[in-house]
Amino acid sequence: MTRIAVFASGKGSNFRALVEAGKAGAHPGEIVLLISDKPGAGALDIARDCGIETLVIEPVKPRGRLDETSELRFLEACRERAVEWICLAGFMRILGDRLLAGYADRVLNIHPSLLPSFPGLDAQTQAWEHGVGVSGCTVHFVDRGVDTGPIVLQRAVIREPEDSAADLAARILVQEHLAYAEALSRLLTGAWRRQGRRILFDPFMTSNTSQSEDKLS
Ligand code: GRF
């Protein structure tokens, strides 16, 4: 089992989906820690219900990039628990260089649009207001930017003519829950490598150790 920490700021449905998928054997990760930057995050309650250790690390500033002190606390908490991979699930913070260097090629995020379209906040509403016919979700590696890292996996969702932005967001969320577990499973159980921005999976090989040709920048 691969030891995983999840960082979440919100209600935690993606976190719950990852926990349940792991229990069902859909990915070989064991979620050992949930860290939130928000003391009232619903994800914390879910973790407690599931018997997963929780930590709240509240940065000085209420939003934006993690300050250096908080970032070190996140990093140390993960290292102390021998965490191998980090999954961001509705974590409303930008990570800094220390965390990204400490977990190079081992930090994932889920975003509710087909990147590179509609990065940033309220992606589902951005897509709906833009009038797209298809949106979806993206699991990607995290780099220094906002939703800019290499794409692992995407799932498309059709916008129906009668959809409100909330309808579209709800159907995207269903796909997010499936996509995150699938991406984790593929990365942890299969051989893969990165070529430039492209993540390539080898369908004919399996390996417990994921591979990367070059480090994410
Ligand atoms: C999800 O739509 C996720 O893609 C985005 O924030 C939302 C979090 O939802 N980054 P939840 O807290 O996982 O329910």
Image: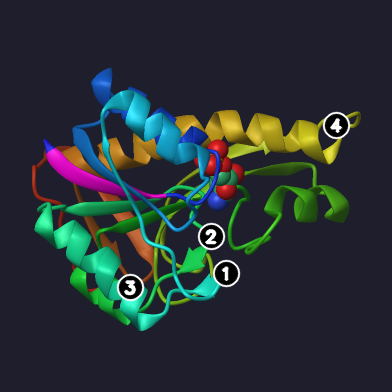
Foreground residue, 207 or 139? 139
**Mark pair 3, 2: CA separation:** 14 Å
| Mark 2 and mark 1 residues within 8 Å of each other at the beta carbon | yes
> What residue is rendered at 49% in x and 54% in y?
38
Mark with earlier residue (3, 2): 3
> Dot 3: what SS?
helix
Q: Nearer the viewer, mark 4 or mark 3?
A: 3
Is residue 193 at least partly visible in the picture?
A: yes
Disc 2: which residue: 92
Mark with earlier residue (2, 1): 1
Disc 3: which residue: 71
The circle drawn on residue 63 is 1
Q: Nearer the viewer, mark 2 or mark 4?
A: 2
Foreground residue, 196 or 6? 6
The circle drawn on residue 163 is 4
Instruction: Kindly identify the amino acid type of the residue bearing the numbered disc 3.
Output: Glu
> Dot 1: what SS?
loop
Asked if the beta carbon under badge 2 is closer than 8 A to the nearest atom of ligand 1, the reply is yes
> Is 96 situated above or below 179?
below
